[in-house]
Image (cartoon, helix red, strand yellow):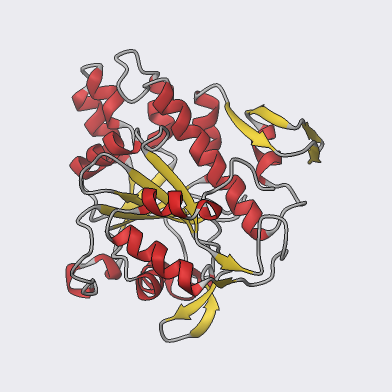
Amino acid sequence: MVIVAVVAGGGYLYANHLLSGVHRIPDIKALDAADQPVMPAAASTGMTVLLTSYALGKSTTTGPARGLKSGLIALIHLDADQKAGAVISLPANLVVPVPGHGNRELGDATAIGGPSLLIKTIEGFTDVRIDHYSVLSFSGTLRVISALGGVNVVVPRAVTSEGHVFQRGTNHVIGHSVIAYARQTQVSEIGRELLQQNLIRAILSKIAHQDLFNSAAADLRLVRALSGAFSVDSNMTNSELESLALRLGKLGTGDGTFVDAPVRHGSATKGGDRPVHLDPALGALLWKAIRTGGVNNFAHVHPSAVTPAAPS
């Protein structure tokens, strides 16, 4: 997510050094060609990256350890034509078949069998092939937001969280106010995941609208913060990271679509931390849309699945 800004300023060698320094997670067996499932013939040739993070205070970029349950789980899908993409949020408390372990909450898959089991689980119920895996550090996200000078988030109603008062409407968050925003206790587990996703969307939006990935005067503090905020699987090359950066820069604009996996009996404010289940009919349509590069059209036809600007 860092190469474009630096290359535009003529710092290719430095940029390549930064990319080489992005932490790699080794031995994710599910990403080896021999272990990847055969997908439907109509599957898209785009790229799908599984993005995860963990509970506040437990999020690092050194790679997930077994026993640690995933928090934020999202699929970042970039269309084959490189003109559009989507971020699809999957609730960690979504009950799905976990290979070899029966029906479990999706976030438990990482705790049971590491990233490979999480990948196999998602591929199993979506028929979407996952090309790469990434872990986002919440502490790294805080440094990115600080380097950006803060970001704007929308709050549906006045609320107080950890001593910080958020007014209804747009709020500027940085430092502790980011933590207070992400830790709101008034929302459900799904709602907390949406809060994290909205922070990611706010970061991408600011980068895109200020053209920070293409600026010759890019702030190297931001570049360094981005390179240290996440880790990726060891199969991802520097050139693939460069390509990913070029395309991620578009997700914060009208070229990006943010949707939630459709669930029953759960919402941002309802259901608490109780398990939730997929809406099978809408789910099947969404998985097909990802496979065929049609998430944007899916969002137009099913606006209820679009990720709200604020959990309400």
Q: Is residue 100 above or below residue 55?
A: below
Taking 220 as reference, is 15 left or right?
left
Taking 5 as reference, is 102 left or right?
right
Taking 144 as reference, is 312 left or right?
right
Among the 4 quarters of the image, the one containing residue 268: bottom right
At 47% from the left and 85% from the top, the residue drawn is: 101
At 80% from the left and 36% from the top, the residue drawn is: 158
Percent x, y of residue 91: 55, 62
Q: Can residue 24 be seen in this view?
A: no
Percent x, y of residue 266: 66, 65
Among the 4 quarters of the image, the one containing residue 125: bottom left
Q: Is residue 146 above or below residue 64?
A: above
Percent x, y of residue 216: 29, 14
Residue that lies at the very extreme toward the top in this rendered image: 217
Percent x, y of residue 248: 34, 38
In terms of depth relative to the viewer, which is nearer, 289 or 52? 289
Q: In this view, does 294 lie above or below 107?
A: above
- Counting labels gives 0
Residue that lies at the very extreme toward the front in this rendered image: 301
Taking 157 as reference, is 310 left or right?
left
In terms of depth relative to the viewer, which is nearer, 139 or 294? 294
Image quarter in which the N terminus is found: top left
Q: Can residue 223 be seen in this view?
A: yes
At 69% from the left and 70% from the top, the residue drawn is: 274
Q: Is residue 1 above or below residue 289?
A: above
At 37% from the left and 70% from the top, the residue drawn is: 126
